[in-house]
Image: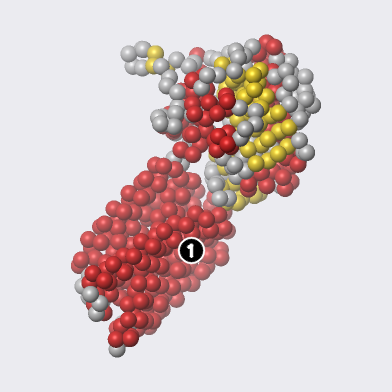
Amino acid sequence: MEAVNIKKSHVIYWASGIVSICGIIFEVLFGALGSYILGDGVKQYTLTISLFLTGMGIGASISERVMKNLILTFVWIEFMVALIGGFSSFTMFGMTAFAPDGTDALFLYLITFTIGALTGLELPILIRKANEIGEKLNRSTARVLFSDYAGGLIGGLLFAFYLRPQMGMVKSAFFVACINLAVAVAILYYFRNEIRKLGIHITAALIIGALLVAGLFFGEEMAFSFEQKLYKDPIIHMEESKYQKIILTKEQGDTRMFLNGSLQFSSSDEYRYHETLVHPAVSYVENPKNVLVLGGGDGIAVKEVLKHDEVENITLVDLDPAVTRLAETNYHLLQLNEGSLKDERVQVLNKDAFRFLEKTEDFYNVIIIDLPDPNNESLNKLYTREFYSLVRNHLLPGGAAMVQATSPVFATDVYWTISETVKSAGLHVENLHVDVPSFGNWGFVMAGREPIDLTEVNIETKTEFLTDDLLQSMTVFGKDEDREIVNIEGEVVPLEPNTLIDPHLIQKYEKAWQHY
């Protein structure tokens, strides 16, 4: 009898560790879902953690009322976690496509709280059952808690390094739910002598299992059809990399790339953007032998740089190898970038741009900064005074840098804050903007160690859009794009540089784009 009790107690410890792994995976999964679909990663992860922990606390409080049928209660808690958690990602994508605005956020927060409450409910029940079997309370509590906390670490690592990059968010949810169900079935088996009407509970487990397996094999395909509703054109490529979701769409010859739902380019007008990004800076420099491109993993900016015969070396630094790999292998991207990343003058490095500039000892005549907008903390650091100081330190005398800096029309405060931040790093700037139909009016900041005179620019390379005369007109801004931010009293508010210590650009960006 004692041996049987010891075996049962070990099962409880293992169950505690495994359900903890599942719980933490669901927690970070909900944070990732919120970040991808709703934006502002820090806000979504903060809300997710807060709601999950609050739910756990309430669940633990409710557990005081559970004094009988502990095993059966735990089993049905796992059944609910499996069903609700398993279908969470799938349902979230469906609601994003079909439900009214704001419903998806409410659903995500409700699911997060519910799974947190169920997770908080199950741990005290396991502790109570371990004590009931016959071990001293302090020992059983310590062991169950150890299994729970250790499981939390394993769950976080599994999600970050395996589940999200290999399975994606829909399959991961169904897969983890299957594990929850397996734990419930294992507990049913080991404690079968304590459970009445066992057949009913086994039947419930089989039904839930059938639903989860169906979701595991077919849920992602259905979620894909939901996600297609979010995009104007048919999706021709979709993958979940370690860093982001990459989507290509195409309709009537127009190829578009989206990273985490944000448009990166449209093949119908990308030349307006990329010619403005590249040629003013490269043409301005007397001998642009060494060029650094930060971001631009699609290879289109590099294609424009390669039009300049004086260029001898191009270093492309893009964080995500999935993007640069796609640029080198995907037919539709190769049509746009003309195989630029395979050119012998090009070196591709998959590194963080900030860390690269901190470590490299190389210097460049031209630095092209083609990074996504500062809509989260990881991107914000690439729009700080500290980052632009690194750019300045690696820019040769007589060199030039060009920064994509979002829209001066839709995000006026953001654009001019970026310009002010570049200036605060000790660089001279020139402000430009251009109309890109797929984006709207888009802004750039050209910078150099010395004052910039665009009248000296002579664009001799082949372009579809940009001319010398047109470049001069790009420096003129309308009243609605003016850098002067005025308060209620009519006073001009000075713009503060964005820094690592004071990353206020993110809040400005969110406020500016929330209606677009």
Residue at 30%, 76% in the rendered image = 71
Figure check: 137 above or below 169: below
Describe residue 45's horizontal placement relative to residue 429 as left or right.
left
Residue indicated by mark 1: 174
Q: Nearer the viewer, residue 506 or 212?
A: 506
> What residue sits 40% from the left and 55% below the top?
27
The local crowd at label 1, few if under 14, some if 14 to 19, many if 20 or more residues have their Cα within 10 Å, is: many
- Tell which residue pokes out farthest to the bottom in this image: 1
Mark 1 residue element = helix
Residue 233 in which image quadrant: top right
Q: Position of residue 283 (x, y in %)?
A: 71, 20
Image position, residue 383 (x, y; %): 51, 30
Q: Is residue 89 above or below residue 354?
A: below
Write the residue at 52% across / 19% down: 426
Residue at the farthest right position: 309
- Residue type at mark 1? Phe
Residue 461 in view: yes
447 left or right, relative to 333:
left
Q: Is residue 78 left or right of residue 335?
A: left
Residue 388 drawn at (x, y percent) = 53, 27
- Can residue 409 be spotted in the picture? no
Scheme by which the image is coloured: secondary structure
Where residue 86 sits in the image (x, y, percent)?
45, 62
The residue sitting at 59% across, 42% down in the picture is: 351
